[in-house]
């Protein structure tokens, strides 16, 4: 049995709905709700640029606080960026239901260095089933170089 101390996506959905009722665009409402309610999203300083059913795109700006000693963005941070944007793309297919990451498969292609900043992280759903959602996530540098690609699977929990 999976226990969750807080239904984070339901809370984000409620907060985003509240902000949209005040005139926020959907991506700004979700971005603000994620920043307020999801500490990992806040740490990475992602900025959601767009969201539509089955798609999400965010901006990531290089930060020395998130690097390896060689100055490249840490692989765990890259995985986190992929997880966050892939989750938003997956979540956009069903909104308020709960979900958890089941699997991530990442190919790190190039180091994420300051010279490539800002980076775009784009997720798109390739399969949305009754219980699982599969996404493809790509990270590109400002020079349009693909630095990482990943597939991820999210499991929708029943309420």
Image: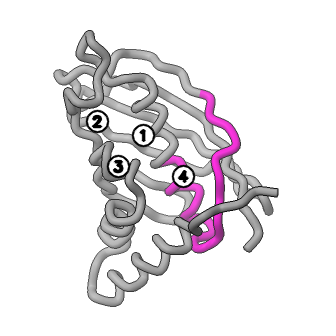
Mark 4 residue crowding within 10 angstroms, few (<14) / some (14–19) / many (20+): many
User: Between 4 and 38, which is closer to the camera in this rendering?
Assistant: 4
Q: Which mark, by number, is residue 119?
A: 2
Sequence-wise first label, 1 or 3: 3
- Asked if marks 3 and 4 touch (Cβ < 8 Å), the reply is no
Q: Which mark, by number, is residue 87?
A: 4
Q: Position of residue 119 (x, y in %)?
A: 28, 35
Identify the residue at image location x=73%, y=63%. Answer: 157
- Asked if marks 1 and 3 touch (Cβ < 8 Å), the reply is yes
> Which residue, as the protein is rendered here, is positioned at the far left?
115
Sequence-wise first label, 2 or 3: 3
Which residue was labeled with disc 1?
Answer: 81
Instruction: Give the extent of the magenta segment.
Output: 85-105
Q: Which mark, by number, is residue 58?
A: 3
Mark 1 residue crowding within 10 angstroms, few (<14) / some (14–19) / many (20+): many
In the picture, measured across the screen, residue 78 lies left or right of residue 113, that is right
- CA–CA distance between discs 2 and 1? 10 Å
- Asked if marks 2 and 1 touch (Cβ < 8 Å), the reply is yes
């Amino acid at each position: 049995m999976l226990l969750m101390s807080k239904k984070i996506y339901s809370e984000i959905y409620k907060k985003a709905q509240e902000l949209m009722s005040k005139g926020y665009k959907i991506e700004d409402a979700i971005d603000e709700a994620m920043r307020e309610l999801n500490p990992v999203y806040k740490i990475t300083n992602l900025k959601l640029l767009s969201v539509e059913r089955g798609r999400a795109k965010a901006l990531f700006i290089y930060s020395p606080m998130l690097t390896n000693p060689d100055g490249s963005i840490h692989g765990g941070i890259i995985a986190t960026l992929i997880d966050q944007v892939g989750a938003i793309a997956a979540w956009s297919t069903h909104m308020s239901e709960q979900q958890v990451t089941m699997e991530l498969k990442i190919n790190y292609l190039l180091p994420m260095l300051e010279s490539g900043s800002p980076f775009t992280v784009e997720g798109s759903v390739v399969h949305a089933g009754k219980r699982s959602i599969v996404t493809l996530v790509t990270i590109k540098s400002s020079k349009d170089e693909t630095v990482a690609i990943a597939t991820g699977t999210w499991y929708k929990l029943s309420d």
